[in-house]
Image (tube, grey):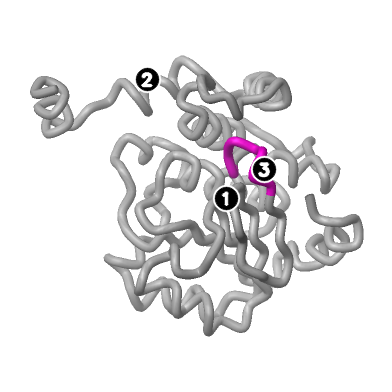
Amino acid sequence: MFTPTELLDIRKFLIPENKIVIITHYNPDGDAIGSSLGLKHFLKAKGVDAEVVVPNDFPKFLKWMPEAKKITIADYKRKKAADLIFEADVIFILDFNASHRAGNLVAPWIEKSKATKILIDHHQQPEDFDFVYSDTKIPASSQMIYHFIEALGEENFVNEDISNCLYTGIMTDTGGFRFRSTSATTHRIIANLIEQGADPATITSNTWDTNTVSRLHLLSLI
C-alpha cells in the first residue's frame, strides 16, 4: 500500500479542479475494466470527474457495467484519447506494470505526459512512477482499488456502481474465486461489496452467461 505520506499527497490530487484520467492495458479484461470503472465511480462519488481511456476495444460481455459505454477507446478515438492524456493533471495506471503494456499507440502518450502518474497493479516488476502501489500477492487490481479506498478511510463512498464493477473485476481475475491467490481477505471484500449493492447473480449472468455467435461456434467445436 502507499505510505501514509503518499496517501496524504495523493488525496491532494483528488480534487474537482484536476483533470484525472484512468488508463488500463492493451486488450482489457474484466479486472482492467472493473478496476478502472470502480475507481471512476469512487471519484465520482467524491465529486471528482475522471475519464477512462483504454488502448483498444474490450469484450461485449463487459459493456453492461455502469458507464462502460463512456470509456474512450484510443483505437477508435485517437485525438480524444491523446488530448485527454496530454491535458491530464493526474493519470492512474491500473492493472499493468509498464507503459509498453498499453500498446504502441498509447504507451508513448503516457511516457510523454507531464501528469502525476499513480500505478495500482498486481503484476511483477512494476516501472517506477510518481506513486506505486504494487502487490503480487493480491489476485486482482480491483481488490487493490478497494484497499486503496480503505486506506483513504473513505469506504462510506462505496456504492452500488462501485461494488458491481469491483466485484466483476475480482470475480473474473480469480476465475470465479477458484484460483489459489483468492484469500480470506478477498472473500471479506466480496461480502462488503455485496452489502453495498453488488448483485452476484446479475454480474455472473451478464459476464459469463452471455455469448456471441462466434463463441458458441467455438464451444461447439471444442
Look at label 1 and name its amino acid: His
Name the residue located 59 percent from the left edge and 40 percent from the top edge.
Answer: 142
| Mark 3 or 2, nearer chain start | 3
Across and down, in percent, residue 94 comes to: 56, 55
Q: Are marks 3 and 1 in contact (CB under 8 Å)?
A: no
Q: Identify the magenta region.
A: 135-141
Name the residue located 37 percent from the left edge and 28 percent from the top edge.
Answer: 207
Q: Residue furthest top?
A: 201
Q: Are marks 3 and 2 in contact (CB under 8 Å)?
A: no
Local secondary structure at mark 2 = helix
Please state which of the two labelled residues, at mark 3 or mark 1, is closer to the viewer.
1
Find disc 2 in the rendering and name its residue.
205
Judged left or right of residue 209, residue 118 is: right
| Mark 1 or 2, nearer chain start | 1
Q: Are marks 1 and 2 in contact (CB under 8 Å)?
A: no
Find disc 3 in the rendering and name its residue.
144
Judged left or right of residue 210, residue 195 is: right
What crowding class fits label 3: few (fewer than 14 Cα within 10 Å), some (14-19), or many (20 or more)?
A: many
Say the numbered circle drawn on residue 123: 1
Q: Nearer the viewer, residue 70 or 55?
A: 55
Look at label 3 and name its amino acid: Met
Across and down, in percent, residue 49 comes to: 61, 60
Say the numbered circle drawn on residue 7: none
Please state which of the two labelled residues, at mark 3 or mark 2, is closer to the viewer.
3
Label 1 and label 2: CA atoms lie apart by 28 Å
Across and down, in percent, residue 54 comes to: 41, 59
Name the residue located 63 percent from the left edge and 78 percent from the top edge.
Answer: 115
Which image quadrant is residue 186 in?
top right
Q: Residue furthest right?
A: 5
Across and down, in percent, residue 73 comes to: 35, 61
134 shown above or below 15: above
